[in-house]
Image (cartoon, grey):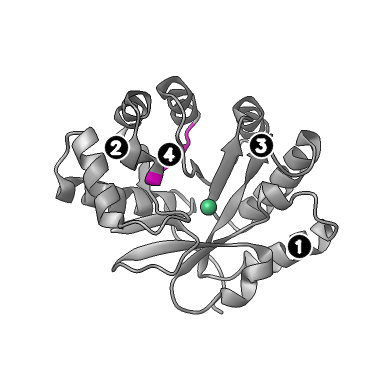
């Protein structure tokens, strides 16, 4: 099973993308795969430029398979204008290194979609920890994004269940994020809501993972970077 996004040390077998801040870069090892980025909550840090410089270096490491979580959050951090600027700079780093992007977005969906349109990125984007309505999910999927669901699905309202049903199987990921929950239980929950066999769901998400982390190069995708 694949855990698309976690801040904890994975406790189950399989692949987990561990999400780190720049300040946690010492946790990068040759084992496992990581995403690294400047979280919008810390977009008002005084050392943003040096963090961006570090991210440029870190993003070249082969185990750093994605840039994230990065994004926009109207409830915390710097002004929205500053957040958009920081987000787009990080997307540029992702583009330069051909790494996909893992996104944290709170109440800034219009701005996020505008950025996507403006930047027209070549690497795919995924929204992590999505808990919005199906209309919102549909807009994001239509713009080419993937959607990852976390522990909120364990107590999903009818609205969130409808969202999960709306997201196509080939755009779906599942994550534990900060929750100490069983990944298998999350997969089971999604398989019930989507009325799909557990094994088929697992295979589909493995396939999505391969698709998401390939790099366009003469029509072929492959993971890029330097070894640690
Ligand atoms: Zn997270």
Hey, which quadrant is residue 168 in on the image? top left
Which residue matches tag 3? 119
Q: Going by the picture, which residue comes out furthest to the right?
A: 46
Which residue matches tag 2? 169
Which residue matches tag 4? 147
Q: Residue at x 47, y 51 (%)?
A: 218
Give the residues drawn in magenta, as a range.
Answer: 144-151
Of the image marks 3 and 2, the number of the one nearer the N terminus? 3
Of the image marks 1 and 2, the number of the one nearer the N terminus? 1
Q: Residues within 10 Å of mark 3 (few under 14, many from 20)?
A: few
Q: Looking at the picture, does residue 59 appear above or below residue 141?
A: below
Between 203 and 122, the residue placed more toward the observer is 203
Horizontal arrangement in the rendering, residue 161 relative to residue 192 (left or right): right
Asked if the beta carbon under badge 1 is closer than 8 A to the nearest atom of ligand 1, the reply is no
Question: Do callouts 4 and 3 mark residues in contact (Cβ within 8 Å)?
Answer: no
Query: Dot 2: what SS?
Result: helix
Q: Looking at the picture, does residue 17 appear above or below residue 211?
A: below
Horizontal arrangement in the rendering, residue 97 relative to residue 45 (left or right): left
């Amino acid at each position: 099973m694949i855990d698309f996004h976690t801040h904890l040390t994975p406790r189950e077998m399989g692949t987990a993308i561990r999400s780190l801040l720049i300040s946690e870069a010492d946790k990068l090892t040759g084992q496992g795969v990581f995403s690294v980025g400047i979280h919008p909550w810390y977009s008002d840090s005084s050392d943003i430029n040096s963090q961006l410089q570090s991210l440029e270096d870190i993003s070249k490491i082969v185990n750093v398979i994605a840039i994230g979580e990065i994004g926009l959050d109207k409830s915390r951090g710097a002004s929205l204008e500053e957040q958009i600027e920081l987000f787009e700079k990080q997307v540029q780093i992702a583009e330069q290194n051909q790494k996909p992007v893992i996104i944290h977005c709170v109440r800034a969906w219009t701005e996020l979609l505008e950025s996507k349109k403006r930047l027209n990125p070549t690497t795919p984007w995924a929204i992590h920890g999505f808990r919005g309505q199906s209309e919102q999910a549909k807009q994001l999927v239509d713009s080419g994004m993937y959607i990852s669901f976390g522990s909120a699905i364990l107590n999903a309202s009818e609205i969130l269940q409808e969202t999960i049903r709306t997201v196509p199987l080939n755009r779906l990921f599942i994550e534990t994020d900060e929750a100490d929950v069983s990944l298998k239980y999350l997969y089971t929950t999604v398989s019930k809501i989507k009325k799909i066999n557990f094994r088929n769901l697992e295979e589909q998400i493995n396939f999505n993972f391969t698709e998401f982390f390939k790099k366009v190069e003469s029509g072929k995708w492959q993971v890029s970077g330097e070894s640690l």
